[in-house]
Amino acid sequence: MFDKLETLDDLLTVQLKDLYSAEKQLIKALPLMADKAHDERLQAGFRKHLRETEEQLRRLEQIGEFLNLSLGGHTCKAMAGLIAEGQETMSERATAEVMDAALIAAAQRIEHYEISGYGTATHFASRLGHVEVADMLRQSLAEEQLTDTKLNNLAKEHLNQKAL
């Protein structure tokens, strides 16, 4: 990506490229997760998050244009690994209830990665005085946090009990 990371601007660029790649990968994975889920609320949640993820990708594209950056050409290896683990889980033989609990666990790992990435990028953008960029990143961060909360609540209040 860079020969050397010399400035916080360089580091912000790396973070944005990573998030862009992560979101593109997730857009491909979420429909598979929705199809594998048995619980209607979980299916609907994955489909809703797919629409949010598509919007987050558009936001990142706007940020790239605003900062005059090309965000393509990078692969987020962490997201690739998280998705690969999720695919491995989806290939397991499991009861419907246990599969749904496993899908939530995999999805929350992904959400936590994204929360970390958006939080870091938001901080960097703020420190660099990119107010509009920080606001757009903060919006995506809030969406990721809300998705994680909804997944957590669905697991704790309903699906984990069924998986027992």
Image (cartoon, grey):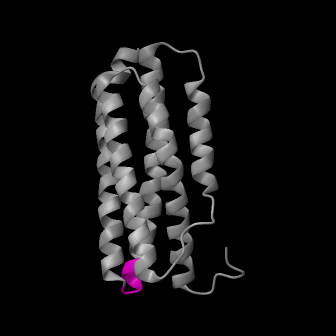
Residue, x 60% and y 57% (percent of image)? 76
- Tell me which residue sits at (47%, 25%) in the image: 36
Residue 90, how many percent across, how many down? 55, 26
For the question of whether residue 17 can be seen, the reply is: yes
For the residue pair 52 and 83, the one nearer the viewer reads as 52
Q: Is residue 160 above or below residue 77?
A: above
x then y, percent, for residue 34:
41, 31
Residue in the image at 30% along x and 43% along y: 149
Question: Quick check: 1 above or below 50?
Answer: below
* Stretch of the chain drawn in magenta: 125-129
Which percent across, then down, holds residue 93? 58, 15
Report the residue that reaches farthest toward the right.
3
Choose top left, top right, bottom left or bottom right for residue 135.
Answer: bottom left
Q: How far across and down, in percent of the image, does residue 70 sit?
A: 54, 74
Q: Is residue 147 left or right of residue 98?
A: left
Q: Is residue 106 above or below residue 143?
A: above
Say if residue 124 shows up in the picture. no
**Front residue of 42 and 146:** 42
- Quadrant containing the N terminus is bottom right
Magenta span: predominant SS is: helix
Seen in the picture, residue 153 relative to 120 is either above or below; the reply is: above
- Image quadrant holding the C terminus, namely top left
Name the residue nearer the viewer: 47 or 121: 47
Which residue occupies the foreground of this view, 41 or 62?
62
